[in-house]
Amino acid sequence: MFLSVGVRFEANVEALNMVETAGNYTKHRRVPYLVEEDRKLKTIYVPAISGESLAHAYQWSLVKEALAMNLPVCEDCAKGEFFKSMNKAHLKKKINPIPDDSKKIEAAIIKSCIIEDVGGFLYAEKPPVRRSSAFQVSYALPIKSMALFATAEPQLHARHAQMDAKGKKGNVSEQMIYYVETGTALYGFTFNLDLDAIGVSSLGAGPIIPEEEIKARREASLKALFRMLSSAQFGAKLSRFFPVGGITELTVVVTEHPFVVTSPIYDSYVERTKKRLEVIKEAFGEDYFFDSTNEVPEETLRKAIEYLKEKGYI
Amino acid sequence: MVSLISFLKVEVRPTGIIALRSLPQSKMRNAFRYPPPSTLIGALAYPLLHIAGDRTETLEPRRNARSSADRIRPLIEWATVKVSGMPRVYGSILKINRLHRRSVESAVTSFPMAVMYGESDYTLTLLYLLNDDLISASEFSVKDFERAAWGISRLGSRESVVSVESVELGKGTIMEKEMAETAYAFLLTGKKVQGGGVVQGVVDWKEGIGNYSKARIIVMFYPEGKVEVEGRLKVIDVGEEVVL
């Protein structure tokens, strides 16, 4: 089973993904948006949120769901440090001595950590072992019809320092000004989850954990997505720049084999996705689940989870 | 006798970003502007193996590791692409802390990517020429290939999620010509081109997919719009268009 989700969310005055810090100025991540004006191409930079940022948030949600369900999470991932068994030092925490058989290494990692099972890993030693992530996330970009209204504006802030009784500064500035660029946009992104990959070897060794645990891990993966979206716990600077807004539209599709919703950055994405699903059903006799809402996103996600339960998949 | 070949024409829409890391890489990573054939085969291999219930990603992991996409490589005669709109390679400058010779230092890096995002609607048309004889002798059917085409979910790495908007399965006629007009990428060697486009060195996918440390580089031409090509050409008509 393959789950694909298209999300549109409004985020006003957010600092969800920052790059290029220069002194006291922190810039929001941006991407070029190409506009044709008087037969010439013009570039406008609009705020964006990287897939990496969203993927980190999803994996952190998965940590919490997995621990709540008593599923294995390794020491590094439990702290939110997704090193993913990248070298001997990290792998030794899972298996010691380290075997020289890649299938044994893969099995040890998957058995001891659901995050690396679902999120993939790369052990970059000899023998190298890699596993692709079972989930995929696109960039979150301003939807195309509103991209020109998306802004990235610097906000001035001041940090005050404690002064001594005589009012001497010493080496400390009394005030330090700094700028944080805040973005405002109606964003769209796509999230895919390949449920068949969970708990199964990517080196051809078949299922690595028992069927019941595979089902539990699939459920945790779905719950993590539910939790991440409903709580809006993704991106940076949430403590002081929590975005004003929320999910405005959500579309969920579940198919037997891979199928991706048309990206929500396009206005016609819901209709296009429906039409494409009909072709799949007609040409290949494949059943699917489809639901879309601009009211209560949690309800749509719940229905998708129910559908997978009915199918005996979780 | 006219010889025919099956083709799959797959129209995909990007989600704005196509991240194609070119290899080999130095400290400052580089990105392809257009997807090379090895990426196109990898993109189709993932859903095709999913249909077969095969979750294998890596073949012979110990010696000469290759991608499982290499399994379907012989079933594909040629893979090429047509792109509407011009992708723009862009990468934010990132400040990172790194460990270098046991000391922590600050470094600057970037993850460039091809941005396909703007007022006009960007589309990529992926074109696969199939080896019918080898497919009929394999565990797959042409119908599996067609369903797999609908399941292409990503081009290249990480956040390059795409959606397939249409799939056309058909038969093309193979012809030999000295001149042709095409919008699809082709091998540049031995050809004269009239028109604009981008020349890109890519790995020779026929040598295997997945391990490019010693791979031969082939030169491809990616047209911007249609170009006229001269030379000893093998041309296949795919609907209203031709590929070389």
Image (cartoon, coloured by chain):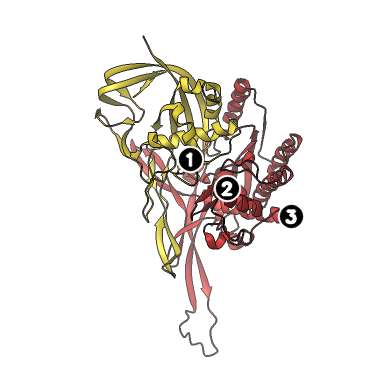
Chain colours: A red, B yellow
Residue under numbered circle 3 = A70
CA distance separating discs 3 and 1: 34 Å
Q: Nearer the viewer, mark 3 or mark 1?
A: 1
Q: Please indicate whether residue B39 sits to the left or right of residue B232 in the image.
A: right
Q: Is residue B101 above or below residue A267?
A: below
SS for tag 1?
strand
Could you tell me which residue is drawn at 47 percent across and 68 percent down? A178
Q: Inspect the image, locate mark 1, and give the three-letter code of the amino acid beneath it.
A: Ser
Q: Inspect the image, locate mark 2, and give the three-letter code of the amino acid beneath it.
A: Lys
Q: Inspect the image, locate mark 3, and give the three-letter code of the amino acid beneath it.
A: Asn
Residue under numbered circle 1 = B67
SS for tag 2?
helix
- Whole-percent x, y for residue A115 in the image: 62, 52
Could you tell me which residue is drawn at 65 percent across and 51 percent down? A111
SS for tag 3?
loop
Pinpoint the chain carrying mark 3: A
Residue under numbered circle 2 = A103
